[in-house]
Image (spheres, grey):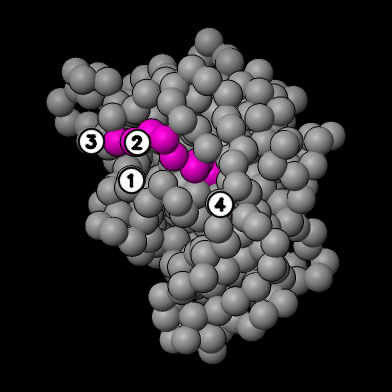
Amino acid sequence: MSTNHSFWQDKVGVKGAIRDCPIPTELADDEILIKVRAWGMNPVDAFIQEVALPFFSYPMIPGEDIAGTVERVGSGTASQKFKVGDRVLGYAMGSSSFGKQERGGFQEYVVVDQNLAAKIPDSVSFGEASVFPLCMATAGHALFSKEYLGLPFPKVGGAPEAGKRVLIWGGASGVGSNAIQMAKAAGFEVLTTCSARNFEYVKSLGADKVFDYTSATVVDDLVAELDQGSECVGIFQAAGPRDAVAPCIEVAAKSKGKPFVACANMVPEGAVPEGVTAKFVFERGDGKGIYYETSRVLLGEFLPTALEAGTYKIAPKPEAVPTKGLEGIQEALDTVKKGVSAKKIVVEG
């Protein structure tokens, strides 16, 4: 093996720096080593270059979304599930690792818990596979954790939950695109919001009814829909600017059922009226990594089966920056900072 290279974020307000580092030689029983062929960019990776968050420590190797080939496997269950040469995607522990700075995804060789990796079929490229991990992890924890909406886990060909539905705010985002598909696979009718130009896109993912979030009447329109239809089991604010929490809470407050609101954005103090429950989707992971208990089911069990069956779509579609390898990471992060819609910026190795 050649020398490993890593993309470090030394502090807030500076560009990332690429440095040589050793390739990991020791694996725990349940770990695999991946030679990365594509990296997916998430808003959090760009955000932490500009804003210091109290639960991240610098210097660190950011990055969560990777896809590549297995180089080595641990001696435990990983050796039974994966073999050298397998094509996989992985959910690395970068900006979400809280203390495991060396385990970030923006490296050429990355160690991943085998429960947070999934084999990918030959029909799925590495760039396409890299769009999934953190988007699925975030959406999955909001939808399926008992601390949030607590829905039953999705299944390929599962039975519908008759008369129940969920509202996903920001359905065209990376997190929203996966939330729509997983909620549908769990058997729920899906209502979502996005801009008018993305209506057909979210419908192609399974959304049953779509509302324009830019409309001046969107809150009242959603309340009217929730009050006249079947039970809404919860609202997930999957994307949007910092103030995107407000309309979701307003919908919950005005609707008769007062559904629980899970928020991908932090909930401002004093923003939740009496009778409504709204929580920021977050956990520290207890040493295993953020969203571990839900992600191990979604990435380790559901996704590989759904991809193989062809029932789960690559969403959002990847868009690769011109520069390949780790040298393309900063270019990709700068692209994310400018804003993207219904696509995910990736870097190919």
Image x and y of residue 255, in percent: 33, 30
Find the distance from the CA under tag 2 to the CA under tag 1: 6 Å
The amino acid sitting under disc 2 is: Phe
Mark toward the start of the polypeptide (2 vs 1): 2
Q: Does 313 appear above or below 74? A: above
**Range shown magenta:** 55-68
Q: Secondary structure at mark 3?
A: loop
Position of residue 334 relative to residue 17, above or below, is above
Name the spot of residue 200 as percent of width and height, x first: 75, 37
Residue at the image position 79 percent from the left and 59 percent from the top: 125
Residue 21: give its label: 4
Would residue 124 be visible to someone looking at this image?
A: yes
Of the two numbered discs 2 and 3 on the same chain, state the one appearing first in sequence: 2
Taking the image as drawn, is residue 237 in sight? no
Marks 3 and 1 sit apart, C-alpha to C-alpha, by 27 Å
Between the residue at mark 2 and the residue at mark 3, the CA separation in whole angstroms equals 27 Å
Mark 1 or mark 4, whichever is nearer to me: 4
**Which residue is at the front of the view, 269 or 78?**
78
Q: In the rendered structure, find residue 277 and report the number of the disc placed on it.
A: 3
Residue 296: horizontal and vertical position, in percent? Answer: 44, 67
What's the residue at 32%, 47% (across, down)?
Answer: 99
Residue at numbered disc 2? 56
Please say if the residues under marks 1 and 4 sit with CB atoms less than 8 Å apart: no
Element assignment for label 1: loop
Lower sequence index among marks 4 and 3: 4
Nearest to viewer (mark 4 / mark 3): 4
Report how far apart the C-alphas of labels 2 and 4 lie in the structure.
Answer: 21 Å
